[in-house]
Image (cartoon, rainbow, N blue to C red):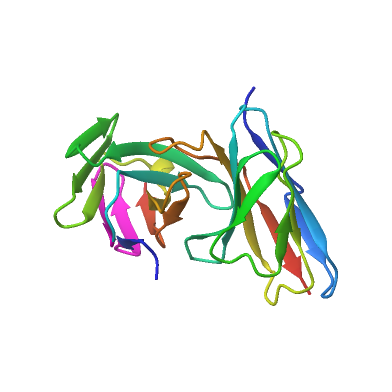
Amino acid sequence: SQQGEEDPQALSIQEGENATMNCSYKTSINNLQWYRQNSGRGLVHLILIRSNEREKHSGRLRVTLDTSKKSSSLLITASRAADTASYFCATPKAAGNKLTFGGGTRVLVKP
Amino acid sequence: DGGITQSPKYLFRKEGQNVTLSCEQNLNHDAMYWYRQDPGQGLRLIYYSQIVNDFQKGDIAEGYSVSREKKESFPLTVTSAQKNPTAFYLCASGQGRDNSPLHFGNGTRLTVT
């Protein structure tokens, strides 16, 4: 089974609304990363949150991390049609920064 | 313009043939990775390399082989032993340290018939 699991699997919202997706993981981590993937393209790194951080912001993105619950959330505020993509959380599996990815949340932002 | 280049973007092969996917990076990264992505799924690690002339199996290495003769290059061969090779293949590179992000290429979509 995968280390990270996103929820929901799919999300459809109107432009301007906020989008929230969650990630749960199983083992202890020293960081958690979020990536975006546009259809048919590679993944793009969005944000990395370390295990000693509880919240981090980057532009319209807000990430939280609760290590006691082994969960993280990604909030996209004031969504735009260009935010339509799949979003993945990833956690390092062992030394060497081998990342394990969840199944992703597919976000559709309707204009 | 730094980045990772995967080629070709689309690849078609007959069953039973080996095929090699190219991955080149000019980011001066020590570590490189190959992932497989099936439709609507997450990524699964095939092989990774933390340094030139060294590589390790990931979670789904059976039916695949790699080489790392140069820092910039990490080609992946999909052999005829891979039972279900049709997939989207993503190459990534990174500094190989914890707390460092991965940089991905734009993938190669392999179709085997």
Q: Name the residue at the front extreme.
A: B54
Q: Residue at x 58, y 43 (%)?
A: B92
Q: Quadrant of residue A15?
A: top left
**Residue range (magenta):** A7-26
Q: Residue at x 24, y 42 (%)?
A: A51
Q: Position of residue A70 (x, y in %)?
A: 21, 56
Q: Position of residue B39 (x, y in %)?
A: 55, 66
Q: Quadrant of residue A59?
A: top left
Image height of B89 relative to B111, above or below: above
Q: Is residue A20 magenta?
A: yes
Q: Residue at x 40, y 39 (%)?
A: B98
Q: Name the residue at the top extreme.
A: B1
Of residues A89 and A2, the one nearer the viewer is A2
Q: Main secondary structure of the magenta part?
A: strand
In this rendering, would B76 be left or right of A81?
right
Q: Position of residue A14 (x, y in %)?
A: 29, 50
